[in-house]
């Protein structure tokens, strides 16, 4: 994990409006959200594992699944996940086990982040600052 200090830290937005700004840029709300916090993820690469720019957010006035919720952004960071190789090579999945075994655990959930994407991560954060009006 590589934190990237940014002017977006501490900025507050309505979650719905923030989603409308970030989705066209390629961000999605990561599946690991909870009722009071979550992450916007931008997938940088997926050649060997997955590399993301991740922007954390925290609810400041309600639950994330409530209409009109305001969130505060945290410090963006670069994250790399390396998944197990060959986990699907021998999978013989039936309907019953498909609902249980559909995702593999990361081999290394905090893998080394490739140096060639560090500058891109910085550029993406600067783009966020400009789009969100915090530059």
Image: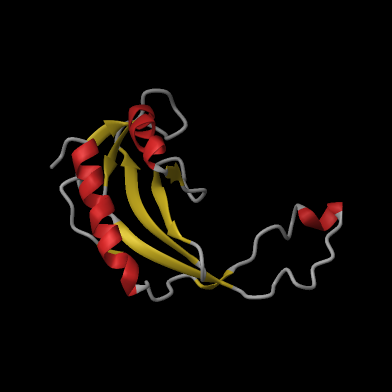
User: In the picture provided, is 105 more to the left or to the right than 60?
Assistant: right
User: In the picture provided, is 91 more to the left or to the right than 3?
Assistant: right
Q: Judge whether 54 appears above or below 115 on screen.
A: above
Looking at the rendered image, the quarter that the C terminus falls into is top left
Q: Judge whether 5 appears above or below 87 on screen.
A: above
Q: For the point 47% across and 48% down, which residue is it?
A: 30
Q: Judge whether 39 appears above or below 90 on screen.
A: above
Residue 124 at what x, y percent from top left?
28, 51
Q: Report if residue 45 is visible in the image.
A: yes
Q: For the point 23% across and 58% down, which residue is it?
A: 122
Q: Report if residue 75 is visible in the image.
A: no
Q: How is the image coloured?
A: secondary structure
Q: For the point 26% across and 40% down, which residue is it?
A: 72
For the residue pair 124 and 83, the one nearer the viewer reads as: 124
Residue 18 at what x, y percent from top left?
33, 33
Q: Judge whether 67 appears above or below 13 on screen.
A: above
Q: Residue furthest top?
A: 67
Residue 58 at what x, y percent from top left?
33, 43
Residue 96 at what x, y percent from top left?
85, 53
Quarter of the image where one finds residue 87? bottom right
Q: For the point 75% across and 52% down, which residue is it?
A: 99
Quarter of the image where one finds residue 16? top left
Quarter of the image where one finds residue 93? bottom right
Looking at the rendered image, the quarter that the N terminus falls into is bottom left
């Amino acid at each position: 994990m590589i934190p990237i200090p940014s002017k977006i830290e501490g900025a507050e937005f309505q979650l719905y409006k923030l989603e409308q700004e970030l989705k066209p840029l390629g961000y999605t709300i990561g599946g690991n959200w909870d009722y009071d916090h979550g992450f916007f993820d931008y997938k940088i690469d997926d050649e060997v594992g997955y590399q993301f720019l991740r922007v954390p957010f925290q609810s400041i006035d309600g639950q994330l699944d409530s209409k009109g919720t305001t969130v505060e952004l945290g410090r963006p960071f670069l994250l790399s996940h390396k998944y197990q190789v060959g986990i699907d090579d021998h999978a013989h999945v039936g309907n019953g086990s498909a609902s249980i075994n559909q995702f593999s655990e990361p081999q290394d959930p905090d893998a080394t982040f490739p140096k060639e994407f560090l500058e891109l991560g910085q550029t993406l954060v600067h783009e966020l600052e400009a789009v969100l009006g915090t530059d």
